[in-house]
Image (spheres, rainbow, N blue to C red):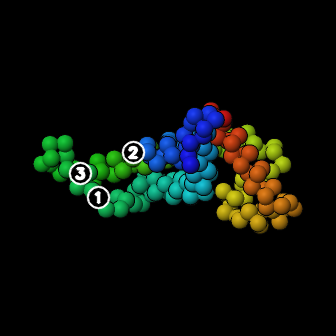
Amino acid sequence: MGYDMENHMLSSQVLERYYGPCAEPPAQAAYRATEQRLYRVPALRERVEDDKEDLAALESGETELLGPRPALLELGRAGNTRRSPQDIRGDQMAALRSRLAANERELRRMAAALSFIADDPYYPAIELRYLRGMREVDIAERLQCDPATVRRNRARLIKRLALRLYGVE
């Protein structure tokens, strides 16, 4: 049923029924996190460009303030004085610079990780799938191989990236 008589062990299904699902193994978690980070790279690149434009507009005075102002930004520390538009603008610029720095740091990390596998003949499978959004069938056609070969080599490269990014095997 779920019991192995020879080894006197319960199967993982029986254990999960009683104790709930087990935590994901570190290697699987790193694999999924790596895929998520790869999928985010194109949007992150666009976000960095938008933030650079917004920051330049704020610094030049072309834009007074970005978007709606939260009430917390308008009130001073005591909560009863109004803050000047210049102070609010300065806070917005600081927040924008901080976000921009974090996003650029993530892009540099991903670029370094991708350069780690760039010499692999199946590297285009990673770039085409995650950075350009192509389907595996189309990638296989472009690389002139079977879709199963693309999947297998893509998984192998994701594991190498996960090792580079997270230090797990």
Q: Label 2's element? A: helix
Res. 147 visible in picture: yes
- Quick one: label 2 or label 3, which is nearer the N terminus? 3
Q: Position of residue 153 (x, y in %)?
A: 77, 50
* SS category of the residue bearing label 3: helix
User: What residue is pinned by disc 3?
Assistant: 72
Q: Label 1: which residue?
A: 69
- Side of 128 where 75 appears, left or right: left
In which image quadrant can residue 6 be found? top right
Whether residues under marks 2 and 1 lie with C-beta atoms below 8 angstroms apart, the answer is: no
149 or 55: nearer the viewer:
149
Question: How far, Cα to Cα, is label 3 from label 1?
Answer: 8 Å
Where residue 148 appears, as percent x and y from the top left, is 79, 58
- Return the residue at label 2: 94
First in sequence: mark 2 vs mark 1: 1
**Could you tell me which residue is drawn at 71 percent across and 65 percent down?**
135
Mark 2 in CB contact with mark 3 (< 8 angstroms):
no
10 Å crowding of disc 1: few (<14), some (14-19), many (20+): few
Task: Work out whether residue 59 or residue 45 is closer to the camera in this orientation and state it.
Answer: 45
Q: Residue at x 31, y 62 (%)?
A: 68
Dot 2, crowdedness within 10 Å: few (<14), some or many (≥20)? Answer: few
User: How far across and down, in percent of the image, does residue 150 sit?
Assistant: 78, 56
Q: Is 1 rendered above or below residue 131?
A: above
Q: In the figure, is residue 27 to the left or right of 65?
A: right
Report how far apart the C-alphas of labels 2 and 1 lie in the structure.
15 Å
Place residue 116 in its image quadrant.
top right
Q: Amino acid at mark 1?
A: Arg
Callout 2 amino acid: Ala
